[in-house]
């Protein structure tokens, strides 16, 4: 294969620069997602594999269990792995996926969408109308107050 001549090098450079600038300036369209999708499953598999692997390392290669029999080491592995996976499951169930502040904002957003887009009346609108009818303040176009 022949080496590129100086002319070919110079003519190749601008075209590669143009292609690079198109790649840099063309940004992908942002899209929102509800959650992290399939990455959640992948992270769960990786974390479970990490618990099993680390439990096996501690049970079979640790200096604490060097005088134990293989049967005892297997039981240490099973108990330790199961215990850590149980704790992991309890923490995942106890800690909410969505913080309370975000839930409040989502509820507020749903209320705004209902009111603005779907013209849903307030629950308090009827109470306010009855109170206005009871009070019956006169509404004037100009202010007669001398101050």
Image: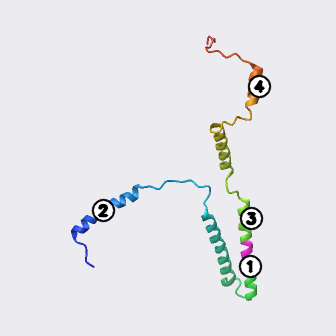
**N-terminal label among 2 and 4:** 2
Say whether disc 1 or disc 2 marks the residue closer to the N-terminus: 2
Residue denoted by label 4: 130
In the image, which residues are magenta?
76-84
So how many labels did they put on this image? 4
Q: Quadrant of the N terminus?
A: bottom left
Q: Which mark is residue 90?
A: 3
Depicted 140 relative to depicted 11: above or below? above
Q: Tell me the residue that label 1 is attached to.
A: 78
Q: Residues within 10 Å of mark 3 (few under 14, many from 20)?
A: few
Secondary structure at numbered mark 1: helix
Q: Position of residue 48 (x, y in %)?
A: 66, 72
What label does residue 15 carry, if any? 2
Give yes or no for contact between labels 3 and 4 (Cβ–Cβ under 8 Å). no
Mark nearer the N terminus (3 vs 4): 3
- At x 21%, y 67%, the residue is 7
Q: Is residue 106 above or below residue 79?
A: above
Foreground residue among 126 and 60? 126
Of residues 120 and 60, the one nearer the viewer is 120
Disc assigned to residue 103: none
């Amino acid at each position: 294969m022949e080496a590129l001549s100086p002319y070919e090098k110079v003519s190749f450079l601008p075209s590669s620069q143009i292609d690079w600038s198109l790649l840099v300036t063309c940004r992908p369209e942002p899209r929102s997602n509800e959650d992290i999708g399939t990455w959640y499953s992948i992270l769960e598999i990786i974390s479970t594999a990490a618990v099993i692997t680390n439990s096996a390392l501690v049970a079979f290669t640790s200096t604490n269990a060097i005088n134990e029999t293989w049967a005892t080491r297997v039981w240490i592995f099973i108990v330790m792995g199961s215990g850590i996976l149980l704790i992991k499951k309890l923490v995942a169930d106890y800690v909410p996926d969505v913080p309370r502040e975000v839930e409040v904002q989502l509820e507020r957003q749903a209320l705004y969408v209902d009111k603005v887009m779907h013209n849903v009346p307030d629950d308090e609108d009827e109470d306010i109308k009855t109170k206005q009818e009871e009070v019956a303040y006169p509404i004037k176009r100009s202010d007669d107050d001398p101050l």
